[in-house]
Image: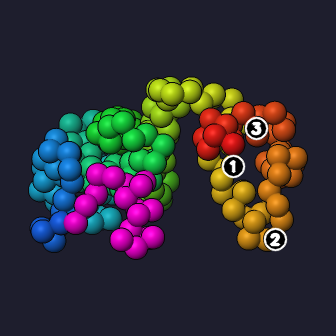
Amino acid sequence: MSEEKKVSQQYHPLVVTSTDENLPAVSNPALHRYLQEISQYELLSREETDELAVRFKETGDPDAAYRLVSSNLRLVVKVAMDFQKYWMQNFMDLIQEGNVGLVQATKKFDPYRGVKFSYYAAYWIRAYVLKFIMDNWRLVKIGTTQAQRKLFFSLNKEKKLLEAQGFKPDVKLLAERLNVKESEVVEMGQRMDGW
């Protein structure tokens, strides 16, 4: 097995080879059914999305909101995949929280600002998925302070960047680069990697 395939399976264990070209095969039957279901919803053009968003904003039309949400459910899966390596217990949990974020985005979206709905929705989906992960981390709760969030998402990336630049990523240098205390770098490193 190639190294790239091992890494891919490590972070995306639900995705395996597929016999159907339209859907990724998955080992979780509930997820497979969900992916089949959402693939039936029609994707909307930018114009259709804008029209539905205006209609929902002005009239509160539930059918417009339903079409906006259902046509963007695949976006939720795509965004949730980015967080799967942080939450390996049940991928459907991430999708469910992302769906809540999508509904919130639909309620708050202002179609007159010229922003694409999918960009706006992706922000809300990420926010809800991230909040879910941070609130429900099982082994060791990852804190919710600004510094801890920064460390959670930046520590490994910063270590690799420093190594690529020829530096040895020690605790002091990482703390300086991320603008946090050395003790926080050590603590987060132990939680994430066991170093």
- Please tell me which residue is depicted at 40% across the width and 73% down the height of the picture: 2
User: Looking at the image, is mark 1 or mark 2 earlier in the sequence?
Assistant: 1
Q: Is residue 163 left or right of residue 16?
A: right
Q: Residues within 10 Å of mark 1 (few under 14, many from 20)?
A: many
**Is residue 15 on the magenta stretch?**
yes
Q: Secondary structure at mark 1?
A: helix
**Residue bounds of the magenta highlight:** 1-17
**Is residue 6 on the magenta stretch?**
yes
- Residue 146: which quarter of the image? top right
Task: Select label 1 or label 3 by which is in front.
Answer: 3
> What x and y, as percent, mark residue 10?
41, 55
- Image vertical order of residue 161 relative to residue 178, above or below: below
Q: Residues within 10 Å of mark 2 (few under 14, many from 20)?
A: few
- Please tell me which residue is depicted at 74% across the width and 70% down the height of the picture: 164
Mark 2 residue type: Gly
Q: Residues within 10 Å of mark 3 (few under 14, many from 20)?
A: some
Residue 99 in view of the camera: no
Question: Mark 3 = which residue?
Answer: 186
Q: Is residue 36 left or right of residue 104?
A: left
- Residue 43: which quarter of the image? bottom left
Q: CA distance from mark 1 to mark 2?
A: 17 Å
> What x and y, as percent, mark residue 139?
51, 28
